[in-house]
Amino acid sequence: CTGCDATGGKYTVSPLRLDKYEVTVGRFRAFVEAYTGPPKAGAGAHPKVTGSGWLADWNGNMSTDSAALESAMEFRPCKLLSVRTWTKEPGENEQKPANCLTWYEAFAFCAWDGGFLPTELDWQAAASGGAENRMYAWAGATLDIDHALYGACGNGVSATCDLSSILEVGSKPAGAGK
C-alpha cells in the first residue's frame, strides 16, 4: 500500500497481517500468568524494520515477575479511561479488551505471542482497508457507521464510561476490516 503521511511524505507499507481482534483480558491474563521477566533482547522485532526488537534498556520499564506484573495491572491508574477491564481474578471481563497497559507491556505481550507491534503506518494502512484506501476499513459500497466501535466505551455517545459500556471483543462482526 502506498500513500502520503501527514507531512505529505511518501511511504510504502509491506503486506502484513494483524490479529483479527483486540487483545482480550483473558488472553492478556495468559501472558501475565506465563510471565517470567522482560523479553530477550531483539524479541518482537518487526520483520521489515531493522533493529526494532526489544531493547535491554527497556527492562526497567517492566515488572520483574508474574506477581509484580499482576499487581501493576491491578493498581496502575488508567490515564485515558476511568475504568479498567483487568481484574485480579478471572471473571466476566475476560472477553473485553485489555486496557490500561503501558507501551512496554503491549510490546512484551506481542513478543510473547510471537508477533510484533505494528508501526503507525501499518495501522494507517490497515485502517484504510489496505491498498483500497477506504475511508473506513469496513466501508464498502455503503458506509454504515453502526458497524464501528466509537470511543472507549463502544457507543461513543455517552460522556461517562462504566464497565458495562465497554463492549466485548468481536461484538461488532459487521465492522470487520480487510
Image (tube, grey):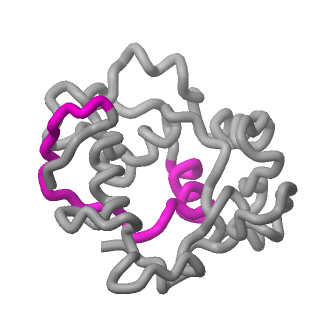
Q: Is residue 114 left or right of residue 167?
A: left
Question: Which residue in the rendered view is the most extreme toward the top?
Answer: 57
Q: Nearer the viewer, residue 172 or 28?
A: 172
- Left or right: residue 78 versus residue 13 is right
Q: Residue at x 71, y 41 (%)?
A: 80
82 vs 178: above or below: above
x 68%, y 43%: residue: 70
The tally of labels here is 0
In the image, the segment drawn in magenta is 7-34
Judging depth in this view, the residue of 160 and 95 nearest the camera is: 160
Residue 136 % position (x, y): 40, 67
**Residue 6 rendering spot, x and y as whole percentages:** 33, 35
Q: Is 103 in the magenta?
A: no
The residue depicted at 33 percent of the width and 28 percent of the height is 54
Q: At 45% from the left edge and 46% from the top edge, which residue is drawn?
A: 109
User: Percent x, y for residue 101?
Assistant: 61, 41
For residue 78, above or below residue 90 = above
Task: Tell me if residue 49 comes above or below residue 23 in the rendering.
Answer: above
Closer-to-camera residue (117/156): 156
Quadrant position of residue 69: top right
Q: Where residue 9 sits in the image (x, y, percent)? A: 20, 32
Quick one: quadrant of the N terminus? bottom left
Q: Is residue 79 above or below residue 88?
A: above
Q: Is residue 128 left or right of residue 109?
A: left
The answer to which of 169 and 26 lies nearer the viewer is 169
Question: Which quadrant of the figure contains the C terminus?
Answer: bottom left
Q: Is residue 92 left or right of residue 27?
A: right
